Amino acid sequence: MALPTESQIQLDAIFKAYDIRGRTDTGELDGEAARAIGRAFAGFISAQYPNVLEVVVGRDCRDSSPWLADALMTGIQVGGLSVADAGEVATDMIYYASGAQEVPGVMITASHNPSEYNGIKLCGPGASPIGVESGLIDIRQMAGESLPDVAPQGGRRTVSIAGGYIDHLFSIVDAAAISDLKVAVDGGNGMAGVVVEDVFARTAASLVGLYLEPDGTFPNHPANPLEPENLVDLVELVVRDHPDLGVAFDGDADRAFFVDELGVPLSGSTTTALIARWFLERKPGASIVHNLITSRAVAETILKAGGVPIRTKVGHSYIKQIMAETGAVFGGEHSGHYYFKENFRADSGMLAMLVLLQVMSEAGRPLSELRSTVEPYCQSGEINLSVVDKAGAIERLAAAFGDGTQDGLDGLTVGWADEWFNVRASNTEPVLRINVEASTDERVEALLHQIQSIIGG
């Protein structure tokens, strides 16, 4: 049996469950790999969608993004497809272009990861997801096969998609329904800054900007609002200037996190519940997708509003696929991804912000009051633990908590009448992720301590 080549090992390291990601400073993800992936993507698309002639490609502001994008676009071209180069954009802008034009899309980004990382997000025509269950494994295999160049090669043109993207957002959200709210936005020096000022110019709301200038070194704080320490500057701004809402975007702006007028962050579950209820007022009986680590309050809110909650794995490709299969109008994840049927089932931090602004405007109540109606439980937030034997740790937990209801949809979930936890292996980092929910903070801490003791044992 032939031993795997170094290039094959590198490809195995960077292909994740629903995207491609690796370090550029160590050569884990380099121009050669990007070209091979572009060539493989062109081959995959040509086989699946023989009438497709062009791929739209965007990139974030990282120092490595221009040369990675160039290498990938070259790979697509030698694979026989043309490229529409959208330049520096947010990920959801590529989803918009893919959906509106029915073409495949590629985004060069490592999202919230540090500046030495980069990655590649792929989607099919109509912003359809490409993950391990929908083509990513095939692309990985093709990328390792040294596919020959084809003739004729595709061309390359520069396109601007910002105007159409903003028009699209306001075809879903009613700009006239957004009142003169004051909104503080921390762009994290990521891609939200490309369009956020133009978005606010369409509304009566006013923008107080923080770190809106795209800078791939992320000089002020990491562009990962899921971590509380990266919200400190935004919270200070909210407490000082008293806006009605604080918003923090991640590096590629497909995720958004929110802070109420008192400076208290909302969980992704709270935001999901509020937006789900808003949709169900407009579309009674609709289905709403939520991943399995959102609060129980999400499903309870959906049911109370007359909707159908659908529980799924963590990850954007899974959410989008389930939404397509069920016709769900909205989907939310605890990690700050929010998906909209009218947005080609794709996630958009900017659209989530606009919907929340419309929710607040129509309610005429502070966000701190609105959130209290969908937050009956206490949560740990996501805790990451480095574990050598992740599978063994999960097995020990399953054995130790045999008195609870268990399922293996994504990792291990164990539940009781008034509390539950989920432990799952990360798709992008060498850690186990733990989420705990209970009726009190004391019970959350006690259950979390018990879990950590077993994992450590």
Image: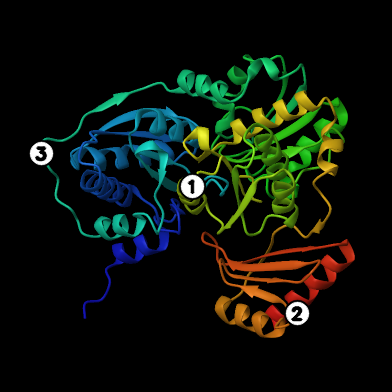
Q: Nearer the viewer, residue 67 or 8?
A: 8
- State the residue position of label 3: 151
Task: Say what secondary structure mark 3 lies in.
Answer: loop
Q: Residues within 10 Å of mark 1 (few under 14, many from 20)?
A: many
Q: In this view, does 422 lie to the left or right of 232?
A: left
Amino acid type, callout 3: Ala
Q: Nearer the viewer, residue 290 or 117?
A: 290
Are discs 3 and 2 less than 8 Å apart at CB? no
Residue 86 visible in the current orientation? yes
Amino acid type, callout 2: Ser
| Number of dots carrying numbers | 3
- State the residue position of label 1: 320
Q: Quadrant of residue 203?
A: top right
Q: Nearer the viewer, mark 1 or mark 2?
A: 1
Q: Nearer the viewer, residue 82 or 343?
A: 343
Task: Say what secondary structure mark 1 lies in.
Answer: helix
